[in-house]
Structures are given as structure tokens and as C-alpha cells.
Amino acid sequence: MPEKNNSFSPLPPWPRTDYCGNLRATDAGREVALWGWVATRRDHGGLVFIDLRDREGIVQLVFNPAHDADAHLVASAARSEYYVAVKGAVVMRREGTVNAELPTGEIEIAVTAAEVLNPSNAPPFPIGGAENTAEEVRLKYRYLDLRRDGMQRNLRRRHQALRGARDYLDANGFIEIETPILFRATPEGARDYLVPSRVNPGKFYALPQSPQLLKQILMVGGFDRYYQIARCFRDEDLRANRQPEFSQIDIEMTGPRPEDIYAMAEGMMASIYKFALGVELARPFPRMPYAEAIERFGSDKPDLRFGLELKNLTAAFAGTAFKVFADVLARGEAIYALALPAECQLSRRELDELIESIKSRQGLGLAWVKINADGWQGPVAKFINDDERKRVVEAAGLHIGDTLLMVAGTPGKVCPLLGDVRLQLGTKFNLRDDAALKFLWVVDFPLFDYSDEEKRLVSVNHPFTAPNPADLALLDSRPLDARALAYDMVLNGQEMGGGSIRIHNAELQLKVFELLGIPRDEAAAKFGFLLDALGYGAPPHGGIAFGVDRIAMMVCGTDSLRDVMAFPKTQKAVDPMSGAPSEVDPRQLRELSIKVAL
Ligand code: ASP
């Protein structure tokens, strides 16, 4: 074997002077010592070239048998992903061999000593071409996948983003406090992960869905401003871009008005973008009431990178003789539309497909008309009279060449549907300004929603969200009309974070629980500790939490969560590398008083 040293020594034969990827022409003449992985090896008969990779990048090594025969032997035997240590001189590359693509491309290392610190099995995929490898395989060999440029860059950018957050929060008097992972269920609307307690047989901890109650209690406990990069666990069916565990930048303040939260959160986001990308964000971010976001964009997280807003045509069609619309209006429902401009036209077939998909998914009809210079065209055009046409042109801001896509029904169904169609068309016609960072606060969320499934009121945010004081009286009469002091930060159509001013009064909290169908005794059993705490001079408080993974995806420009997490799980909540979740020893189960009934 050419490896001179015994590869069992855990101590490298010499200290490293530099990272491979940091060397530049200005280092020419220096003697350096490097460690790294063999990325590629080219044997030119006499000379052997190796691209050596470490976290900073790649540098070219040249092994000349005339310089050091032993080192040359090491190079000849080295293979992909061997971990080697080398010593040598930084030399300028000869003209014509400079590689302008590589930051280190002007220089190379004339190696004088080399040792293999650890050989490698043949990697299951080339590190450079890992993008073309099935994700399951990359996750199984995540340690190899992590050596890739892209993963190295993403995790470092994530680190910078978190530095930006910590730096800002620290400078603004927020104290980082850790809260327990073994706790009890916090209702954030998902299923809990449970952990059996060995010493309390039959009892379980719940992993926190968020540190919501603990951060509120920290305000009662006098810390005034808290933050934490908190791990949260939600046992949900994994949709794309959901992970069973994820991180939040979790924040709570004593006595804020929503404006104080907005200003603080914008400052933090600006610091994140500055640290991660060196970009200055324009502030303050615009704000939009929830009702307006639904009305104009059919979404509580509108993507403002393009227009194509929804148009409310309910008034324009008042008194129409067109039976389909007249019936809808008679039921007090509404008619909304999208006006597709001339340059974004759908073919008849595409229109038919859209109509079909809306019908099969939502059971609603879509009617379209094309606004031609010589009149309106389309299956329903003949039902719309001249007066209505005038009003519709005005309400929808129509131009010659536009196609109007109209849907009638309850706004609660129609607006989100058209909101989805809007996003699809935005993608199809490439309407988004990809470089734009369209931040937005969506404010004035409703406090409650009605769950048809559960036949009761449910919290839109969570049960600890304060009602807007102006709407307190509505709690008894029309709770669904009460607004919450809740807000979301949205970027390019994605929710980056959300929070609220909290209820700090035990009586009001009990009342909200009751409206949610949680009677006093159940509230006392589940949340007695919170209600007790509120009873001891709890100050008004409020906060917000941001999805770290979302932020990382945005600053890394990727649309997969798995690209910004070191060890993500698959859609089936499995870690292919370790095989978690796994069966456990029957003895462990006995100790936990657990029987598996499969
Ligand atoms: N606990 C909330 C969440 O996880 C955030 C908050 O209200 O601060 O969404």
C-alpha cells in the first residue's frame, strides 16, 4: 500500500495552514499544508493532478515524480473521496492552463509530501453530479451529499441568516432563553409527538408544537423581551415542504402594540438579509388587512410580484337576467373574476381544462368571455346585456383583447379558488418579477373560523390570541366577525412568520376557551398553569415566530426545505441515513409500560 502513515492515527501528520479553496495568486511562493478530499484525479503518465476539496472549495495539486517519488505514489493510488494531507508550494499556473472558472484557478500546489489519512469506498454518486442522483440515495449518504458545493453554501447562508437575527435581537435587548422539549401539548392545530414517561407510567410528555405558552409565561416571569431559535414538532401528514421538526425564531415582548412588533420584525429581517446576502431591504413593509388580501388576491399570503388581481363583479351584475348569476345573487353570494390581458391568452382547450378542473375539485362553474373589438365572444356572452357590459368593463378595468374568467358562489369559496388560478396563471405566463422581494404584513385576521367538520368555532391563529379591543362586544353576538390582533409577515406569497398580541387576562382567556368549546373545567385541567400565571400581574404581551427553514429557503433561492436542513426527513417522516423511526428493544417498551398493538 502506498499510504505511508498508518491510517489509524487520529492525529493528522501536520497542521493545516490554509483551506484549499482560499488560496489565490497572492499566495504564490508560500509553503502550505492542506487537508481535503480527492475530488478528481488525472494521471498524465508522469504528472498526476488532483483537485483537492475542503469546505472552502477546490485547489489543484500537482504531483511530479521528480519532486517527491513517495508523494507521487500516494497520488497514483488515491481515489475519489480519499482524505489526504499534503504539503507543497503555491505556484502560478503556466499560461494557457489558468482556469478562470475556479477562484483558485490561477495557482496550483507543487506537492512535496502527501499522506492518505483515510481511504474511501467508491462513493455511490459523484459529489459533483449529486443533483442527478435520486434524493432517497442522497439522504441515505447525507454525509457525502453535504460535501457538495450547494449544501455547503446553503447551510452557511442559513448560519449567516441566523447570525443576522441573533445580532439584531441581542442589540435590541432580547434575551435568548431555552425552553423544554419535554413539555405538554400546546395547541397549534397539529397532532402532537408524544414521549412516554418511564417514571410516571401511563403519562406522556408532548414535544412542543411551539414554545407559545412558555414564552408567554416568560413575560409573566419578568424577562420583558425573549427570543429563541426554537425547535418545534408537529405530527402532520407531510406535504411537500413540511418537516415533522422545524425551527422557529420565536419572539415575545412585553407591552407591544402591533406596530412595535412590525418595526422590530422588519429590523430583524433586514439584518438577516444583510448578513446572509448583503442586501438592504426597503422598509417599512406595506400592510394589508386580511379581508382586503382575500378580496384582491384570494389569499392570506398574496404574492405581490405580479398583478392579475381578483375583480368583484357582484354589483356590476345586480339585476342580471343571466339565470346562473341571478340565482347566485339571489342567495346573497358573489361573482368574482380575473381579467387575463391580451398577451396572456388561453386556448379553447386550456379554458376547457381549467373549467373541468375547477368543476371536479370545487364543484363550481367558470364562465368566460373574450372582449373583442367587434363584441364579446364566448358561451355566456349572449346573456350579458349592454348595461352590464359597461359596468363590468369599468369594475374589471377591461381592455380589448382581455379574457374575463368569472366564478360565482360564496366569497369564502370563490376567492381562494381564483387566488389559486391566479398563481397558476402567474407561473404559466411567467408574470412574476423573480428578482423582487415583495414583503407584506397581512393584518386584522379574524379571531375565529367555523369548522364544518367539528361544528364549532376554531381559532384562526391559536387560542391565546387577543381579540381586537374594538371588537370585544362582538364576541357575544357575532364572534365570527371579531378581528384578532394577529399578523403575518409574507414574502413573495410565502408566510415567513406570524404572531399576535396575547390575551393577558384570565377571564377573557376563559371566555375565548368557552367560545372554542373548551369548558372551564377542561381549560383549568389543560391550561391551569397559564390561567394561574395570568392571575399574578401578567403584563400585556405579544410576539411572533418566524420559520427559520422558510427564511433559509428564501435567502438560498431554493424551493426545497431539504436543501436547507442538514438532516431532513423524507415525505414519509423517515431518515434514510439512520433508519429512524425504528423498532425498539422489547425491554425498553416494558420499562415504559407500553404494548405495541399492531
Ligand atoms: N406560536 C405561534 C406559532 O408557532 C407564533 C406566535 O404566535 O408567536 O405559529
Image (cartoon, helix red, strand yellow):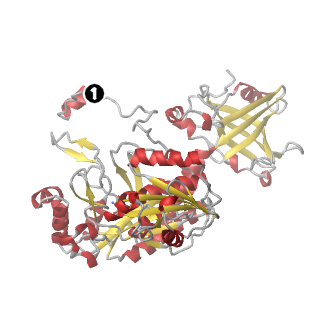
Residue 252 in view in this figure: no
Residue 541 horizontal/vertical position (percent): 30, 72
Identified at 33% across, 48% down, the residue is 234
Q: Nearer the viewer, residue 581 or 356?
A: 356
Q: Residue furthest left?
A: 521
Can you give x and y, in whole percent of width and height, for residue 312 in the image? 45, 67
Q: Amino acid at mark 1?
A: Asp
Horizontal placement of 336 versus 99: left or right?
left
| Placement of 171 over or under 374, stated as above or below | below
Quadrant of res 176: bottom left
The location of residue 383, given as percent across then percent down, is 47, 60
Q: Which residue is mark 1?
A: 585
Asked which quadrant contains residue 502, the reply is bottom left
Q: Is residue 22 visible?
A: yes
Q: Against 222, is 15 above or below?
A: above
**In this rendering, would 96 be left or right of 148?**
right
The percent coordinates of residue 243 (x first, y second) are 41, 45
Q: Residues within 10 Å of mark 1 (few under 14, many from 20)?
A: few
Which residue: 62% across, 57% down? 344
Left-right relation of 233 to 163: left
Residue sticking out furthest to the right: 95
Image quarter hosting the N terminus: top right
Identify the element where label 1 is drawn. Answer: loop
Instruction: Say above or below: 287 vs 377.
Output: below
Is 372 in front, or is 187?
Answer: 372
Name the quarter where the C terminus is drawn.
top left
Left or right, 96 with reference to 439: right
Give the number of callouts: 1
Res 273 → quadrant: bottom right
